Image: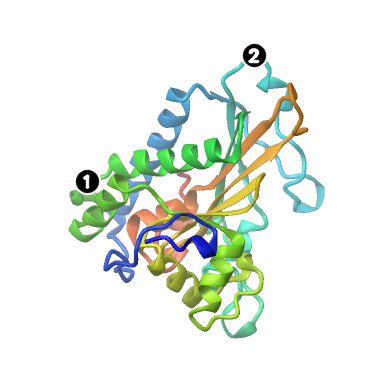
């Protein structure tokens, strides 16, 4: 049960639902998973009333800086678009899920075949819960389009349990305290190593976990894949003021979670094959 002293929003009891990572899928199955998952992302967002916009180019110097298509939000149910994430690219092959290189060495530059693909979705939002719910529904919808023939029986069972269960939510302070009680020194949650992430996810039932850093920012932690999505609110929190919500989803990490593999390279396609929406 949830511990009120931890400030837990919604946490499942520890269970045996957390599974160790499996072997990479054969290339033919991997291609099919990519095709189905990417199509499902696009169809889900369109069904939610989002309009697809042209891809967003990174700002000068590789920063993911500027707001994308801000004026198109007016009079629409929302927009979505694709762009590359230079920061996410640091969590490439040869790094831990958290983004820290193994052994303290500098991470290798990402190759074209492993370049992370990020989908951004923006629309008016009342609060952060609305955005977290959107990200959770998106993940569940994509998972529901995959069968045991494509991802294997163990993965299908794991994902079916994930689809049927509400995903736990923690405040950042509660997550830190939970880890400290189990002997970890978490420091910055964004820099959690693989072991700390696994411990936190196990305590939350082995399910994807929302972590709320503030009333306007939350991240989505997936087993095996690490930080895969973030939700942010922008605007003035005053009566009558319009708040804009943004959901950023790293599709490469979602695919890694769906396939149940430990390394991003094991979820990607060879030779720079493009699978982005």
Quadrant of residue 141 in the image?
top left
> Is 242 placed above or below 174 here?
above
> Is 187 placed above or below 104 here?
above
- Inspect this view and state whether residue 208 appears: yes
Q: Position of residue 250 (x, y in %)?
A: 53, 49
Image quadrant in which the N terminus is located:
bottom left
Q: Position of residue 43 (x, y in %)?
A: 41, 29
Single out the mark in the foreground, 2 or 1. 2
Name the outermost residue toward the front: 5
- Count of numbered circles in the view: 2
Position of 18 with respect to 264 (left or right) is left
Q: Quick one: label 1, few (<14), some, or many (20+) residues within 10 Å?
A: some
**Residue at label 1?**
147
Secondary structure at badge 2 equals: loop
Quadrant of residue 142 in the image?
top left
| Disc 2 and disc 1 in contact, CB within 8 angstroms | no
Name the outermost residue toward the top: 75
**Rendered image coloring scheme:** rainbow
In terms of depth relative to the viewer, which is nearer, 213 or 27?
A: 213
Q: Earlier in the sequence, mark 2 or mark 1?
A: 2
What's the mark number on residue 6?
none
Marks 2 and 1 sit apart, C-alpha to C-alpha, by 38 Å
Position of 157 with respect to 19 (left or right) is left
In terms of depth relative to the viewer, which is nearer, 135 or 21?
A: 135
- Inspect this view and state whether residue 269 appears: no
Q: Residue at x 59, y 85 (%)?
A: 103
Position of 239 with respect to 20 (left or right) is right
Quadrant of residue 119 in the image?
top right
What's the mark number on residue 75?
2
């Amino acid at each position: 049960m949830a511990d009120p002293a931890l400030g837990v929003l919604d946490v499942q009891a520890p269970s045996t639902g957390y599974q160790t990572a499996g072997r990479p899928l054969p290339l033919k199955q991997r291609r099919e998973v990519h095709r189905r998952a990417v199509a499902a992302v696009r169809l889900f967002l369109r069904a939610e009333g989002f309009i697809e916009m042209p891809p967003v180019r990174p700002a000068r110097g590789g920063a993911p800086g500027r707001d994308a298509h801000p004026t198109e939000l007016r009079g629409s149910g929302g927009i979505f678009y694709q762009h590359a994430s230079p920061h996410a690219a640091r969590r490439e092959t040869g790094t831990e899920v958290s983004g820290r290189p193994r052994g303290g060495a500098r991470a290798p530059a990402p190759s074209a075949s492993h370049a992370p693909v990020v989908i951004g979705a923006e629309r008016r939002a009342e609060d952060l819960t609305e955005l977290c719910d959107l990200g959770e529904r998106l993940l569940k919808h994509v998972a529901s389009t995959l069968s045991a023939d494509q991802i294997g029986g163990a993965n299908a069972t794991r994902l079916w349990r994930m689809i049927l269960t509400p995903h736990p939510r923690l405040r950042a302070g509660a997550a830190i305290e939970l880890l400290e009680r189990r002997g970890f020194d978490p420091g910055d949650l964004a820099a959690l190593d693989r072991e700390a992430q696994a411990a936190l996810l196990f305590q939350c039932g082995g399910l994807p976990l929302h972590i709320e850093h503030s009333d306007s920012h939350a991240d989505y932690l997936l087993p095996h894949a690490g930080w895969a999505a973030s939700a942010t609110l922008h605007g003035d929190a005053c009566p009558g003021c319009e708040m804009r919500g943004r959901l950023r989803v790293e599709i490469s990490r979602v695919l890694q979670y769906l396939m149940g593999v430990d390394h991003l390279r094991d979820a990607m396609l060879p030779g720079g094959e493009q699978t982005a929406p």
